[in-house]
Amino acid sequence: MAPDEPERDFFDCGGNSLLAIRLQRALLVRTGAALTVAELLRHRTIGAQAAYIGSAAPGPRPDAPGRAD
């Protein structure tokens, strides 16, 4: 279930450790942000994750899907 507010907690929206791994992969594919599961668990809302990704500016990794060399 997708949260209707960016500040709703991932686990309050039905999230669990397996979904955190799926979220980790989706963020990598869609944004190039290679967050660890621990980082996702520290930043448990969409707003916090977006702010963290924006502040860390983690650009695409060399092994990220979709990279054109």
Image (tube, rainbow, N blue to C red):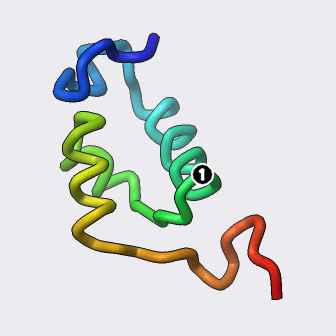
Q: Quadrant of the N terminus?
A: top left
Q: Position of residue 5 (x, y in %)?
A: 24, 18
Tell me if residue 30 comes above or below residue 33 in the rendering: above
Quadrant in the rendering for residue 17: top left
Q: Is residue 64 left or right of residue 10?
A: right
Which is nearer the eye, 54 or 38?
54
Q: Quadrant of the C terminus?
A: bottom right
Q: Residue at image x 48%, y 76%?
A: 59
**Residue at the disc numbered 1:** 30
Tell me if residue 8 comes above or below residue 54 in the rendering: above
Q: Is residue 49 left or right of residue 26?
A: left
Q: Residue at image x 29%, y 63%?
A: 54
Q: Is residue 66 left or right of residue 62?
A: right
Amino acid carrying mark 1 in the image: Arg
Q: Residue furthest bottom?
A: 69
Tell me if residue 15 comes above or below residue 18 in the rendering: above
* Helix, strand or loop status at disc 1: helix
Q: Residue at image x 50%, y 40%?
A: 23
Tell me if residue 36 comes above or below residue 41 in the rendering: below
- Crowdedness of circle 1 by 10 Å Cα count: few (<14), some, many (20+)? few
Q: Residue at image x 32%, y 61%?
A: 53
